[in-house]
Amino acid sequence: MEPIKLGLLHSRIRLEEKMLVQAIKQRDDVELVMLNTSHLVLDLASLPQVDVVLDREISQSRALHVLNALEQDGVKTVNSYAAARVGGDKVLTSKRLHNAGIPTPKVKIAFTRESALKAVEEMGYPVVLKPVDGSWGRLIAKIESRTAAEAILEHKSQLSSYYHEIFYLQEYVEKPDRDIRAFVIKDETICAAYRTSDHWLTNASLGSKTFNCPITPELNDLCVRATQAVGGEAIAVDLMETQDGFTVHEVNCAMEFKTSLQAVDIDIPKLLIDHCVKAAKQMRMGDQK
């Protein structure tokens, strides 16, 4: 069998991408094809010839267009266009989680400053305001009073992106000084890490510390269900601990794992590449039948 052509969709080579490239180079059945969107030009009549694409693009809009085009030509993508579309939009994600019966914080969505302020007052202080398509803890605000709400909503309404005209309001969840990032590949939670911080935000990009989180049957079931709810197959699931059990507050399709690797004894890059290659081979065998 010819080597699997694995396209790595990216625009920036971070530590995670370096580790993924290394995992690919350790295999003799895979040919690496670097798909750098900073240079990539899509000819819709002649797309890159690859068997599978692993999405590592940090730009949601770039990733969606490339994934959609390649999928229409029968290329396996991890994650799929549909999963990336849902996972990259907090409104869509929250609705999928809610409909699947997965514990998730209460959310209200408004489209004007006035209606957003009314929603905040109805929810009660504090409330968390998040960008619909944000990551790395950017532009997240914990609103603790009407005065703060008026100022923050005014500032947000003046930002240029139309996404900032969507006010995503999430209830503030009382939790320990940590949250959990769990990693799901296909139907298994392969590992998880606590992220702890003195700040109410525990994003790794903001300097949180990590240590291993045991995978219990309850945690595994919830993370797998969350992954299935958004239609993904390689997903990072973010959870918080409450008095009533776990609650899932976000999912991440192009999973970031470099900080978590310091806490877990699992080779995430290898398992991710293994999954991509297996999926591509299954599609190839299906074509041959």
Image (cartoon, rainbow, N blue to C red):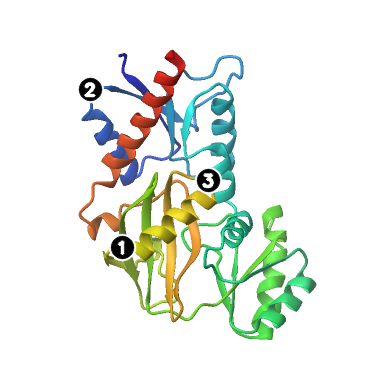
Q: Which residue is mark 3?
A: 231
Residue 183 place in picture, x, y as percent: 36, 53
Tell me the amino acid under the disc marked 1: Ala
Residue 73 place in picture, x, y as percent: 56, 21
Q: Which label number is shown at residue 28?
A: 2
Q: Which residue is mark 1?
A: 193
Q: Residue at x 26, y 40 (%)?
A: 270
The answer to whether any part of residue 6 appears in the image is: no
Q: Is residue 182 left or right of residue 227?
A: left
Mark 2 or 3, closer to the camera: 3
Tell me the amino acid under the disc marked 3: Gly
If the image is split into quadrants, where does the N terminus sit?
A: top left
Mark 3 or 1, closer to the camera: 3
* Residues marked 2 and 3 touching at CB (< 8 Å): no
Mark 3–mark 1 Cα distance, whole angstroms, equals 23 Å
* Residues marked 2 and 1 touching at CB (< 8 Å): no
